[in-house]
Image (spheres, grey):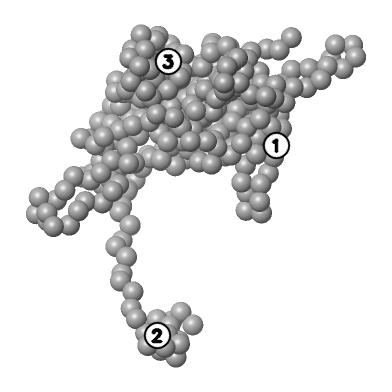
């Protein structure tokens, strides 16, 4: 008998990468750039997050879309897959962070998640940020190992058998949580997925075998690589996996009625203390303008002057 998928999709609230920078009141002739330019805070310990628009981490949007498509593929209707696909029991979205994380969880439910859990974290008192001189919201986030330990507890208590999450968040770019989670659970893992397929294993005589096997394709330097693993499994997603849907207005209204549980790290017995401390954050130096040369001889002479050749 086929075991239904119980999917966990962790999501993170990050600075909205598509937010337009406000116009400069002292330079109204030059239009602002199309994307926001992150600024280092006054203490040079993190990126300034105050008064900046936040949204759902784009890699997590891909994971959520993949989970929703898995459910659609196994549900009778126009989007049902022609190939066998495991039934999906429910899709659980989870986020750990300050109170405003409920916004991204509501977005996740509007896109198609069935319910959500918000693990509330005080950015100052829960991680010792105040002792290190960090400003609120800047040093209060969980480190990848802390997130992995939290997710492992959620997996056990919520009886999940498939976890799909973004390969990284666009704020710290750690690309560690999925791998650490698989290690803590002792599950198979596949990272940077550009394609996910489920294949039904045949039962052998005597009742052995059966169930579902996950086939994941990812891009590598020499082409593509495909790995397979039976359930349960952890998969991290890359940009070429799919194109996330927009939440429609009716679904946004329905999401307000879906269940959103409030939890704390203590509820899961997880220590949120930090093991690493950011010493200094600096902006990259401004790029110098290029120069023009008349011909190849001039270019070679210039390169010799610079010591490049």
Numbered badge on residue 302: 2
Q: Secondary structure at mark 2?
A: helix
Q: For the residues marked 3 and 2, what is the alpha-carbon distance in whole angstroms?
A: 60 Å
Total numbered labels placed on residues in the image: 3
Residue 227, numbered label: 1
Task: Report the residue marked by disc 3.
Answer: 116
Q: CA distance from mark 1 to mark 3?
A: 30 Å
Question: Residue 140 sits in which quadrant?
Answer: top left
Nearer to me, 189 or 144: 189
Q: In the image shown, does 82 or 153 lie closer to the viewer? A: 82
The quadrant of the rendering that contains the N terminus is top right
Q: Position of residue 86 (x, y in %)?
A: 66, 18
Residue at image coords 61%, 36%: 195
Residue 213 spot, x, y in % from top left: 72, 25
Residue drawn at the location 40% of the way across and 81% of the way down: 306
Q: Position of residue 51 (x, y in %)?
A: 20, 35
Q: Image quarter for residue 287?
A: bottom left
């Amino acid at each position: 008998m086929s075991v239904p998928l119980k999917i966990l999709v962790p999501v993170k609230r990050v600075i909205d990468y598509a937010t337009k920078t406000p116009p400069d009141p002292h330079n109204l002739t030059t239009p602002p750039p199309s994307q926001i330019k992150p600024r280092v805070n006054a203490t040079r310990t993190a990126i300034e997050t105050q008064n900046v628009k936040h949204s759902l981490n784009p890699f997590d949007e891909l994971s959520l879309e993949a989970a929703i498509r898995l459910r659609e593929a196994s549900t009778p209707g126009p989007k049902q897959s022609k190939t066998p696909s495991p039934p999906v029991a429910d899709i659980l979205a989870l986020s750990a962070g300050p109170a405003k994380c409920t916004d991204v969880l509501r977005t996740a439910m509007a896109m198609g998640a069935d319910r959500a859990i918000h693990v509330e974290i005080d950015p100052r008192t829960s991680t010792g940020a105040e002792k290190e001189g960090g400003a609120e919201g800047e040093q209060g986030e969980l480190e990848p190992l802390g997130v992995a330990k939290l997710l492992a507890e959620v997996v056990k208590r919520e009886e999940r058998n498939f976890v799909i999450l973004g390969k990284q968040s666009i704020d710290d770019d750690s690309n560690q949580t999925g791998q650490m989670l698989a290690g803590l659970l002792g599950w198979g893992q596949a990272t940077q997925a550009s394609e996910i397929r489920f294949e039904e294993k045949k039962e052998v005589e005597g009742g052995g075998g059966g169930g579902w096997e996950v086939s994941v394709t990812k891009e590598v330097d020499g082409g593509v690589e495909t790995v397979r693993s039976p359930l349960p499994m952890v998969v991290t997603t890359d940009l070429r996996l799919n194109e996330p849907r927009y939440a429609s207005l009716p679904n946004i209204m329905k999401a307000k009625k879906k269940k959103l549980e409030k939890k704390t790290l203590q509820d899961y017995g997880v220590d949120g203390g930090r093991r690493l401390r950011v010493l200094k954050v600096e902006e990259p130096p401004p790029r110098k303008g290029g120069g023009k040369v008349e011909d190849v001889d001039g270019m070679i002479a210039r390169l010799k002057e610079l010591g490049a050749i």
